[in-house]
Every structure is written in structure tokens, then in C-alpha cells.
């Protein structure tokens, strides 16, 4: 084939920067929300539960509320997620695409034991939490042409994996109206490995305009990560009276150890090049976050909740080889990055359609609704994300509670910092269904 060297230079130049997936050494670490993992009850109220947090599914929302568990509890939460993404590029409009992903997972398992020590009411909790998941898949074509060469490429990007914790929570009733709690999160365990990977695949062909000779090329790239760390959540719950409660929570920052592995394989026409393999140990700084929430009980059958929450994403830093500090959000050096904090606002309510807990029937049927503003960090300004949730439940006194909730989140023109050169933007529609059950039992029952 003619112009082989020139072809190879053009191929390398085009393949690396195209579509925002440059070979820069770190992955597109998509931890751009700091979720409050909880049961379907709290999801149905838009996660606005820092002033409530009174069951075993709420320990990560506010560990100070675990003291309100009157009996021993076992709980499980399962989640179904469907994500639809509309991807667009201003420079390459033929690469615009709509991509759908579906996933389901066990979100939480928890145990709570109320105990009494030296006349002090306490509660001890253990939980498995599926905190972050990496669900993403894009497929798009890329066409390009210049005076020398015209090319056609097909790109496929897939991301999968998870980050989980094993957590221990201790709650203490300091005063009759004040309780506090702490949750210790172990971000590496033998139950589920905290790993995720990203795969890039590209197949292309090109034609030289000077003599109509053809070429083919291909790229396979895999980046694997393992995440390990420790942090703690602190919570307070202050009950002013029967009607009003205030909750506060702080999640400490921490530095996670990252084991990184990079593999790349290139083909040019029929020639397979020597694969590239890199391994190193990096660091990922997770940011500080904190929030406050309230509960207002209008009557025995109706209450409203509200939360304000803040995450300091400017302290979200990837440290490559323990030397080079990069923002995982826009891939710029920290000194050049302009990533700020995000402010989250959530409102929710619960109304008991049937309240028979005080009579021989001993059951209740609640309905719930919530709205939220849940932005994600981006350069110069956060990406606006809005949503709502609805839920319903059934509680049998001293036996069990079953809850379900639906949550919808949407956003337009987000993630622009992923590729400013080619005018990247994304529209997001996310549907989630949560199912949870709490089983109440008498072992070690509080006296």
C-alpha cells in the first residue's frame, strides 16, 4: 500500500483525540453524584429524610436516627435502573446518538439491634451498601475528511462495575430529645470487589484521495480500576417537639487507593501491533459533604420533610503516580480546573391513606411524594438535574414493612466539559424503581 507511514501518522492523530476519549492516562471516573443510599420509603420522599431517618434503611442518610429503631430490624433494598442518553456533537453531528442502558442490583442489606448500656439507649447497625455503579454504553459513527484522506469509524464505549461498602453504625441517645450516631464505611471487602472498567472499541477504514487506495485500522482499549478506602459519616437528630425535628449529617473526605491497569491493542490493515500494558498505583481524593434537614409533622397522618445538602467537588482529585493531580471531571490539572461545589435541595411528604396501627388491625398504608434538585459538577457551573419520586407502602405492626418507589431524573445539555473541542453535550432521562422490605424481630429487644 502507498503512503503507509503517512496513513499511520494520520490514524494516530485522529484516533487519540476524537470524541473526547483521548489517551490521557486516567479513566472517565463517573462519580459525579454523592448518593444517599436508602430504602424505598425515603426514595419516595425524594431522599429528604435527614430529619427523619428512623429505620434500618436510613443509616447512611443520618446515622443519628438509628436510635429510633424500637425493635430489631432486618432490611433489604433492590433497585432497577433504566438510563436513556441523547449524545450530541456540534462538530460531528453524524455522531449524535441515543443510547439506553438497563441494570438491577441489590442496593442494601442491613441489621439493627437496639441495646441498653448503663441506662443509655443505643443502637448498633451493620449494612452492605451498593453506593456507586458505573453503567454506561455509547455507540456512534464518526466520519471525517480532509484533502488527503477520508475515514469512517464506528466507536463503542462501555463502562461497568460498582463501588460498595461494609458499614457499621452506632447510635446513642444523648438526651431524650437529642441523639447522635456515626457510621464507619469500609470501601473494600471480601463480599464484593470494588472494581470498574471501561472499554473502548473502534473499527475504521479510510481512502486516500490521491490514488483511491484503502486502509483499515482498529483499536481496543481497556482500563480497569480497583478502589479501596475508609471514611465515616456523623449524624445528629434533634427533636424540638412532637411536630419538629432537625437532622444534620457530615461525610468525611478520604483518599482512596486506586490500582490502575491499562491495556491497548492496535491493528493497521492486517498488521497487529505489539500490545501496550501499564499498571500503577494512584490516589483518588473523595470530597467532603454535609447537609441539614427538617421534619414537620402536621398531624398523625401527614408530615413534610426537606433537606439541603452540599458537596465540595473542588476537592475531588485524581493523583496519578502520586505526583500529577488532575480533576476527574474535566481532565485538567487541578491548578487550571474550575470545579466548584454543588448544592442539593430535596422536599418530600408522607400521608397515611389508612392508619390502623392503634387498633386490632395493626396496619398502615402510606403514600409518598418528593421533588429534588440534584446537580452534578462540571466546569464553571454545575449541571442541573431535576426529578421527582412517588411511593407507597404497607406496614404490619411489629411484623414487617414493604415499600416501593419510582424515581425519575432528567437533565439537558450536561457534561459539556467532557469534550469542549467537539462540542459534546448530553440529555439524560433516568428511571429507577426501588423495592424494600423491613422485617421486625424480638432478639435482643430493647427493654
Image: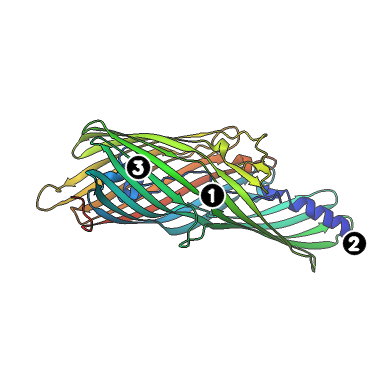
Query: Does dot 1 land on a helix, a strand or a loop?
Result: strand
Query: Does dot 2 land on a helix, a strand or a loop?
Result: loop
Q: Earlier in the sequence, mark 1 or mark 2?
A: 2
In the picture shown, does residue 71 fall above or below 306? Answer: below
Rounded to the nearest angstrom, the CA distance separating label 1 from label 3 is 39 Å
Q: Residue at 38% x, 44% y: name it.
A: 182
Q: How crowded is mark 3: few (under 14 residues within 10 Å), some or many (20 or more)?
A: many
User: On the picture, is 154 further left or further right than 175?
Assistant: right
Coordinates of residue 105 in the picture (x, y in percent): 43, 59
User: On the picture, is 171 further left or further right than 176?
Assistant: right
Q: Which label sits in the foreground, 2 or 3?
A: 3
- Report the front residue among 125 and 9: 125
In the picture shown, does residue 444 fall above or below 236? Answer: below
Q: Residue at 57% x, 36% y: name it.
A: 314
The residue tagged 1 is 85
Residue farthest to the bottom? 270
The residue tagged 3 is 181
Residue farthest to the left? 360
Amino acid at each position: 500500500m502507498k503512503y503507509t507511514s503517512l496513513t499511520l501518522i494520520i490514524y494516530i492523530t485522529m484516533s487519540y483525540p476524537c470524541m473526547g476519549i483521548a489517551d490521557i492516562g486516567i479513566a472517565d471516573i463517573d462519580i459525579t453524584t454523592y448518593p444517599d443510599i436508602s430504602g424505598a420509603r425515603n426514595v419516595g420522599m425524594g431522599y429528604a429524610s435527614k430529619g427523619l431517618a428512623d429505620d434500618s434503611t436510613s443509616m447512611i442518610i443520618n446515622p443519628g436516627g438509628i436510635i429510633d429503631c424500637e425493635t430489631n430490624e432486618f432490611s433489604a433494598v433492590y433497585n432497577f435502573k433504566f438510563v436513556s442518553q441523547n449524545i450530541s456533537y456540534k462538530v460531528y453531528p453524524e455522531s449524535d446518538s441515543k443510547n439506553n442502558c438497563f441494570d438491577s442490583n441489590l442496593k442494601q442489606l442491613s441489621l439493627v439491634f437496639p441495646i441498653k448500656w448503663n441506662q443509655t439507649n443505643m443502637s448498633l447497625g451493620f449494612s452492605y451498601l451498593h453506593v456507586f455503579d458505573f453503567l454506561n454504553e455509547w455507540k456512534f459513527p464518526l466520519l471525517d475528511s480532509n484533502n488527503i484522506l477520508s475515514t469512517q469509524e464506528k466507536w463503542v464505549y462501555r463502562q461497568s462495575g460498582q463501588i460498595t461498602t461494609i458499614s457499621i453504625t452506632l447510635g446513642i441517645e444523648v438526651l431524650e430529645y437529642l441523639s447522635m450516631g456515626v457510621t464507619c464505611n469500609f470501601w473494600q471487602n471480601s463480599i464484593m470487589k470494588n472494581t470498574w472498567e471501561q472499554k473502548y472499541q473502534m473499527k475504521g477504514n479510510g481512502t486516500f484521495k490521491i490514488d483511491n487506495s484503502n486502509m483499515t485500522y482498529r483499536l481496543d482499549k481497556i482500563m480497569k480500576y480497583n478502589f479501596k478506602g475508609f471514611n465515616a459519616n456523623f449524624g445528629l437528630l434533634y427533636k424540638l417537639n412532637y411536630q419538629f425535628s432537625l437532622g444534620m449529617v457530615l461525610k468525611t473526605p478520604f483518599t482512596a487507593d486506586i490500582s490502575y491497569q491499562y491495556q491497548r491493542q492496535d491493528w493497521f490493515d492486517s498488521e497487529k501491533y505489539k500490545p501496550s500494558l501499564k499498571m500503577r498505583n494512584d490516589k483518588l481524593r473523595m470530597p467532603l459533604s454535609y447537609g441539614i434537614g427538617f421534619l414537620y409533622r402536621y398531624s398523625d397522618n401527614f408530615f413534610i420533610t426537606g433537606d439541603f445538602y452540599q458537596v465540595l467537588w473542588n476537592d475531588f482529585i485524581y493523583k496519578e503516580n502520586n505526583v500529577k493531580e488532575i480533576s476527574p471531571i474535566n481532565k485538567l490539572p487541578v491548578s487550571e480546573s474550575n470545579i466548584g461545589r454543588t448544592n442539593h435541595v430535596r422536599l418530600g411528604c408522607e400521608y397515611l391513606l389508612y392508619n390502623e396501627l392503634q387498633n386490632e388491625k395493626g396496619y398502615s398504608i402510606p403514600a409518598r411524594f418528593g421533588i429534588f434538585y440534584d446537580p452534578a459538577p462540571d466546569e464553571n457551573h454545575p449541571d442541573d438535574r431535576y426529578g421527582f419520586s412517588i411511593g407507597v407502602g404497607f406496614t404490619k405492626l411489629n411484623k414487617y414493612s414493604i415499600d416501593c418507589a419510582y424515581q425519575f431524573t432528567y437533565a439537558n445539555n450536561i457534561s459539556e466539559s467532557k469534550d469542549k473541542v467537539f462540542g459534546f453535550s448530553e440529555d439524560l432521562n433516568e428511571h429507577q424503581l426501588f423495592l424494600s422490605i423491613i422485617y421486625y424481630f424480638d432478639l435482643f429487644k430493647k427493654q
